[in-house]
Image: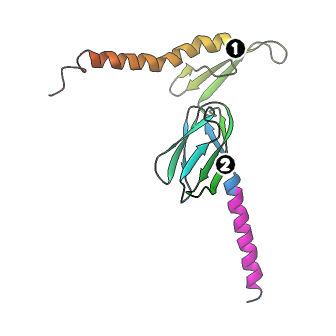
């Protein structure tokens, strides 16, 4: 019995160390994508350090979605009703690693080179990313940022023209 007690105490310390290491591990979320996170029991408040880098949406008492908004790092803090910290995690927002192609044009090293980024699924499409030359980024970025405004405008025009098509049953 005496030998088991130190062994049990050592196993408990190791388990506590592993839990602390898991708690301290950082979260990496791709830019413009979401990551589902499981909230600890008793979670009452969920706060993101810098909402310009990442945002969080609480779905229910156990689940939240973390959205990567801009490249960078911030933290996610979860507290209980008494203000005790249940979770404090570093959040890193990074570029997407798969289904992307970057083309570098120009001299390597000392000269000015140009970067073009593409998202590739069934075909590759130009996707401007920070780090490209301002001329390229601004030329392509305008079409992407204006897309949501054009869609909203089209939806408003359809609703003001009689609420859509006449093919729907009344």
Q: Position of residue 55 (x, y in %)?
A: 57, 37
Task: Looking at the image, tell me whether mark 1 or mark 2 is earlier in sequence order.
Answer: 2
Q: Position of residue 160 (x, y in %)?
A: 28, 16
**Residue 13 falls in which quadrant of the image?**
bottom right
**Which is in the foreground here, disc 1 or disc 2?**
2
Q: Position of residue 99 (x, y in %)?
A: 58, 31
Dot 1: element: loop
In the rendered image, which quarter contains the C terminus?
Answer: top left
Residue 80's disc is none
**Residue 23 falls in which quadrant of the image?**
bottom right
Q: Residues within 10 Å of mark 2 (few under 14, many from 20)?
A: some
Query: Label 1, label 2: how many angstroms apart (C-alpha)?
Result: 33 Å
Q: Residue furthest bottom?
A: 1
Q: With respect to residue 30, does 77 lie above or below?
A: below
Q: With respect to residue 59, does 80 lie above or below?
A: below
Q: Residue at x 64, y 55 (%)?
A: 85
Q: Which residue is mark 1?
A: 133
Q: Which residue is mark 2?
A: 89
From the viewer's side, name the closer residue of 101 and 160.
Answer: 160
Is residue 111 shown in magenta? no
From the viewer's side, name the closer residue of 20 and 126.
Answer: 20
In the rendered image, which quarter contains the N terminus?
Answer: bottom right
Q: Which residues are magenta?
A: 3-21
**Is 135 positioned to the left or the right of 164 in the image?**
right
Magenta stretch secondary structure, dominant: helix
Dot 2: element: strand
Q: With respect to residue 13, does 47 lie above or below?
A: above
**Is 152 positioned to the left or the right of 21 in the image?**
left
């Amino acid at each position: 019995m005496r030998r088991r007690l130190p062994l049990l105490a050592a196993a408990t310390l190791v388990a506590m160390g592993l839990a602390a290491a898991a708690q301290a591990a950082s979260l990496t979320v791709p830019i413009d994508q979401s990551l589902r996170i499981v909230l600890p029991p008793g979670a009452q408040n969920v706060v993101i350090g810098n909402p310009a880098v990442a945002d969080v949406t609480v779905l229910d008492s156990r689940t939240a979605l973390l959205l990567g908004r801009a490249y960078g790092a911030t933290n996610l803090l979860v507290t209980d009703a008494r203000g005790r910290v249940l979770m404090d995690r570093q959040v890193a927002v990074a570029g997407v690693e798969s289904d992307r192609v970057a083309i570098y044009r120009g001299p390597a090293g000392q000269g000015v080179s140009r970067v073009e980024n593409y998202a590739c699924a069934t075909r590759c499409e130009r996707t401007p990313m920070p780090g490209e030359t301002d001329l390229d980024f601004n030329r392509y970025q305008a079409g992407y940022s204006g897309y949501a405004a054009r869609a909203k405008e089209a939806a408003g025009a359809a609703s003001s023209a009689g609420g859509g098509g006449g093919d729907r049953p009344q």
